[in-house]
Amino acid sequence: MEDLVIRDADVVDGTGAPSYRADVVVDGGRIVSIVKEAAAAGCQRPSAVRELDAGGLVLSPGFIDMHAHSDLALLRDPDHSAKAAQGVTLEVIGQDGLSYAPVDDRTLAEVRRAITGWNGSGDDIDFDWRSVGEYLDRLDRGIAVNAAYLIPQGTVRALAVGWEDREAGPAELDRMRQLVAEGLEQGAVGMSSGLTYTPGMYAKDAELTELCRVVASYGGYYCPHHRSYGAGALEAYEEMVALAREAGCALHLAHATMNFGVNKGRAPELLALLDDALAGGADLSLDTYPYTPGCTTLAALLPSWASEGGPEAVLRRLTDPGTAERIRHHMEVIGADGCHGVPVEWDTIEISGVTDPALAGYVGRTVLESARARGEEPWAVAHRLLVADRLGPTILQHVGHEENVRAIMRHRVHTGGSDGILQGAKPHPRAYGTFPHYLGHYVRELGVLSLEECVAHLTARPAARLRLPDRGVVREGYRADLVLFDPATVAAGSTYDRPRTLPAGIPYVLVDGRFVIDGGRRTDVLAGRSVRRTPV
């Protein structure tokens, strides 16, 4: 007998086609049979070891998180309900140009320090890998959900060039090409950049283009966090489109937002730019999260000149009074490139997490609120946190616009990405709520997308970007990465006050045909593995 039959499910198959009623049979980790309208037709119905009555539930492909920061969480937390309970069955990690492979001992220590705010210190992790392939092998020992990996261009630059603001020499560029090629050969699906983060931001377009040529030769895609989401945002998008065109590389725009006051109501301009590129033959997609605030580290707002040389160099500059004053002036008056060219507005910067428990009183309050409570200037508070917590604080940045969020999510190349940082006492609720928030708030309550459209955005469309031949659609022969949810009740439980609350209305999630969520509860199943690039 087969492993499982899911009876009378309303199948939303990921293609955008209308839903249909069916029995879906799973065996050996794959969908082996779909019997449409079996009950109504009166035909003999399939049987299995387990029969699940899905009446009133939608069966869809598992959701694909196109922008995740679970690089260490997948290893640290086998439960990983933050994503599994949302119906996520695949995450794309290695984002924003900084992650933990490929590295040597020096670079690993530097990267761990630089992105402590994203992933924690890693003191509880055995870093028994150095290459991309070794990291993927580590994931293959068993994780909660599947994971694909992007080669982080900033980490590659740190390994070949260092953390200095200078052009790469010919030998260094050759070394970076080699590292990117090796990572792709070992299974990475593409390359990411963080062009407002050091050291990736120091790469000129010519350097990035050369690396993207390598990515294109392996059939991968380029995923940049580009140079600005504030002042100059449209120019930054244009830069990435032109770069990808020059390299002949597929392009996926990370967390494609239009933020800060200068971009209020300007999403149509971005969408027109994308439509022109698509009409010209660009292979282009994007992801967004369905919330207005962003999330990053407090140190990310610093100007690039202050961040040169890595974390220890940054701390030395912050502890020099004259240099610290220059940093303040650049951030508050000029507009640092780390803050997307916009003068920082401290009333929009909410501290979401710190690594030192002694600083916990700052969490959940904006920098301005803490400054007023202490009778200080906002920079004094921000400076204290950066130095005392050794660049560890994470922030929510309340700079988004709802009309932009809704307009972008409607676009035909849009996919979903949580950009969820799981660290800190009060992380962004998107880490625990992105996918049910799409389905509950933007589909059921607002009607911004139809259910079939939204599921396609979260499943088949990202699977196509990842060039996965057997995922993202409910179809015979495809892998049984599946989610069952109640369209009448599905909703994000996470809020800004209670960001780690799990969602409602998602009682069943399967990875490789095995239940990771069963009856609304996390099982002990670790069916996830690395999902490696399909050779061209």
Image: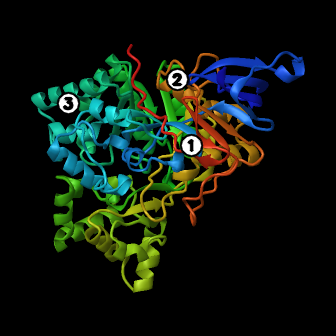
- The amino acid type, in three-letter code, at marker 2 is Ala
Secondary structure, mark 3, is helix
One can see residue 339 in this view: yes
Horizontal side, residue 535 vs residue 485: left or right? left
Q: Tell me which amino acid carries mark 3.
A: Met
Q: Amino acid at mark 1?
A: Ala
How dense is the environment of label 2, judged by Cα within 10 Å: few (below 14), some, or many (20 and up)? few
* Residue 60 x %, y %: 66, 31
Q: Which secondary structure lies at badge 1?
A: helix
Q: Nearer the viewer, residue 274 or 217?
A: 217
Q: Earlier in the sequence, mark 3 or mark 2?
A: 3
- Of pointers 1 and 3, the one earlier in the residue sequence: 3
Q: Quadrant of the N terminus?
A: top right
Drawn side of residue 92 relative to residue 127, left or right: right
Nearer mark to the viewer, of 1 and 3? 3
* Towards the viewer: 240 or 33: 33
Count of marks overlaid on the render: 3
Residue 92, position as x, y percentages in the image: 44, 36
x 27%, y 72%: residue? 388
Identity of the residue furthest to the top in this view? 536
Mark drawn on residue 61: none
Q: Which residue is mark 1?
A: 267
Pointer 2 residue: 464
Mark identifier at residue 176: 3
Q: Is residue 353 left or right of residue 258?
A: left
Badge 2 marks a residue whose secondary structure is: helix
3D distance between C-alphas at marks 1 and 3: 35 Å
